[in-house]
Image: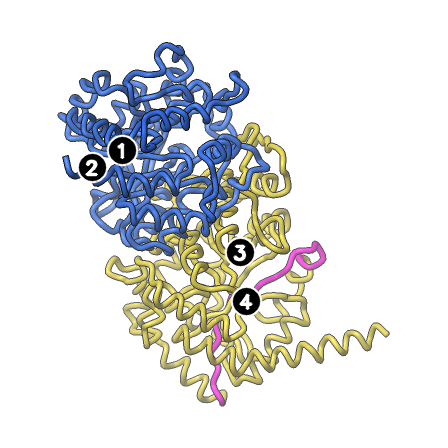
Amino acid sequence: MKFHWMLPKGGEVALDGRQTAREAARYRIESMQSTSPAVRPDIVGWTHFARHAEAAGIDSVLISFSRYEPDPFVVACALGQAVSKLEFIIAYRSGLMQPTTFVQQMNTVSALVQGRVSFNIVAGSSSEEQRGYGDYLSHDERYARAEEFLAVCNAFWRANGEVNYEGKYYRVEQAKLATPFIGTAPEIYVSGHSEQSERLALSQGSCWLRVAESPAKLKPVVARTRESGLGVCLRCCLLCRPTREEALKAAESLLPEDARESTTTLKDDSQMYREGGELKSDSYWPEPWLWTGLVPHYGPVWTGLIGTPQELATAFREYERIGVTEFILSGWPEVETVDVFGREILPLINQS
Amino acid sequence: MMPKGGEVGMKTAQETSRVATTKASSPAALPDMEGWVEFARCAEEAGIEGVLLSFSRYEPDTIFVACAVGQATTKLKFIVAYRLGLMQPPTFVQQINTLSGLIGGRVSLNIVAGSSAVEQRGYGDFLDHDERYARAEEFLSVCHSFWANNGEVNFSGKYCRIEKGKIFTPFQSADRSEPEIYVSGHSEQAQHLALAQASCYLRLIDTPEKLRPVVKKFRDNGVEVCLRLCVICRPTMDEAVSAMRALLPPEEIEKQERKILASSDSQTLKDALLAADQVGWMNRNLYAGLVPFYGSSAIALIGTPRDLAQAFMEYKEIGVTQFIIAGWPKLEEMMIFGREVLPLVREAEQEFHAKAQRKNH
């Protein structure tokens, strides 16, 4: 199994290490405000985290995309100059640039970071945010366009000659790019919970990325995806403490003071966020080690794996048994959690 | 001008002709961090303020080259050339703002409308020359709104529609809230765009007499003027002219470069070829004859350090404020410029300002 991590937001990493789980979580929650330091690149904090991630045995960091934060392409390029092993998964939305430009940027970054780059294509989850980028398509149309977008990209990565494409959303004629991708072609993570995202992953992606759910629920989906030759990557958070009681207490400390607090009101156009919003409180524990209590407030990516190192190692092994191939993890605080993962959980996973 | 990938290590000018760098086997397709960082550090030492990074399908993307070389330098500014129509303006603003935060604000933009219709179609852009400029006008006004406005941006144009646009990452620089914008091109549309949206009009060098009215028009409207040129500087004029002669490549290269120039729909390229063929020496030191071999930006000031310093001052007198310079070989000629020409120019500038002050008193 491969283990990746979320790149912390700008300013999130406390260099002195003094940050409680709650402080780290609050920083993330408030990072969508224009007054947050997260709007600025933070190469010092990121490099600090990246070195810890490399030491912990993490393969890549996912760099998220939104209007609230720096552009992930440029961040990957800068951070790639500072560390030499860690790889970068760049989240990007289709519809923001022409596929030819996207490929030129991806190939350029690959050459500047020795091929350590792949990407996660996202169709967009908020119609308001998309319109701010000049994109007025509906959810389903965005997926149809993403299909064309990736088809053009893949044509560049497969072809040595010129690319010609004529679709509904994109048309390119005699396209050529001199700068090659370093490696064969980037890994393409397609994320989402809708049928359209699954279809897109199957036709154009190399790995389907979705939020962790109980192994029993995921089993058929994972089997179907793996049979088609795709990897499956799960996104979740980690809360690991020496005892289960301590872990539960830490989880509780993350609950908002205001029970109505939500950062997902703008996410009006995503199947994944719709599912998260419909969660009832009696279903917050799909497994003794899987907690969705923060999801109604902050969205499905706040789904947590909770317990002792041994319990979490066992949970990862269960996912491995049903065919999951990769994980993108995060925690509160990020540096401390990645340290614990590398020191206490990963050795147990590799042992068993 | 930043050399293309691999050029810093090339010893002859002939290797750096456009015909050579647009071949599939050219090292120009790949980033050349070693060469670029060496060049950038030498440029900083030579007193060069910024480097222009050119954009085309034959080269790595300029935004990331600036990002990577910017990590390795501290003073040099990067003028990132980018074509419009390749991405949505909010995305562009987000990338440029991010870049500014990562390299201490050392970024400005050279907006190009695109000079080859074939190349543009490969990027999914099917507009003609004039429409590309109309779109550029919209694109830049959206960008300006993002930089000027801390709230939301709303825009409804022919090519671009933005509703409640917000980009949280700000443009970060010690002295500017938005990047300097160079608009280049010789056509009327380019000039119009530069007057409306740019902080600096960038064009090819010509004789001071020819440029005087154009420069005045821009300066009167608060827009600076930057000239693109090459230099060949040697201790004597004879040596400089033989250095120029030594640059001439084989005839076959000329034929191919002529084909590129002739098929372009850019006014700049047409003008440059005409100057080369019909004029040659545009005045005592300005020579257009290299254009058919090295492209439109190869009009060169040729002479001794004193000749060149004098020529630069003539442009300063008519109101030109900036120059983007290249030479052959890229690194060596820049070092000559920094060592021999620039000190003379700086000296003359001081005299020039002292004289102006005396006049005012």
Across and down, in percent, residue A36 comes to 56, 38
**Residue count near mark 4 (Cα–Cα under 10 Å), binned few <14, some 14–19, many ≥20:** some
Colour in which chain B is drawn:
yellow
Across and down, in percent, residue B60 comes to 35, 54
Labels 2 & 3 near each other (Cβ < 8 A): no
Q: Is tag 2's residue or tag 1's residue first in the polypeptide sequence?
A: 1
Residue drawn at (65%, 56%), measured in percent from left and top? Answer: B223
Of circles 4 and 1, which is in front?
Answer: 1
The chain carrying label 1 is A
- Amino acid under label 1? Pro
The chain carrying label 2 is A
Q: Which mark is residue A348?
A: 2
Q: Which quarter of the figure has residue B208?
A: bottom right
Please give the residue where the numbered disc 1 appears in the rendered image.
A309
Residue drawn at (22%, 28%), measured in percent from left and top? Answer: A203
Of circles 4 and 2, which is in front?
Answer: 2
A79 or B253, which lies in front? Answer: A79
Residue drawn at (63%, 51%), measured in percent from left and top? Answer: B195
- Amino acid under label 3? Gly
Labels 1 & 3 near each other (Cβ < 8 A): no
Across and down, in percent, residue A89 comes to 32, 41
Of circles 1 and 3, which is in front?
Answer: 1
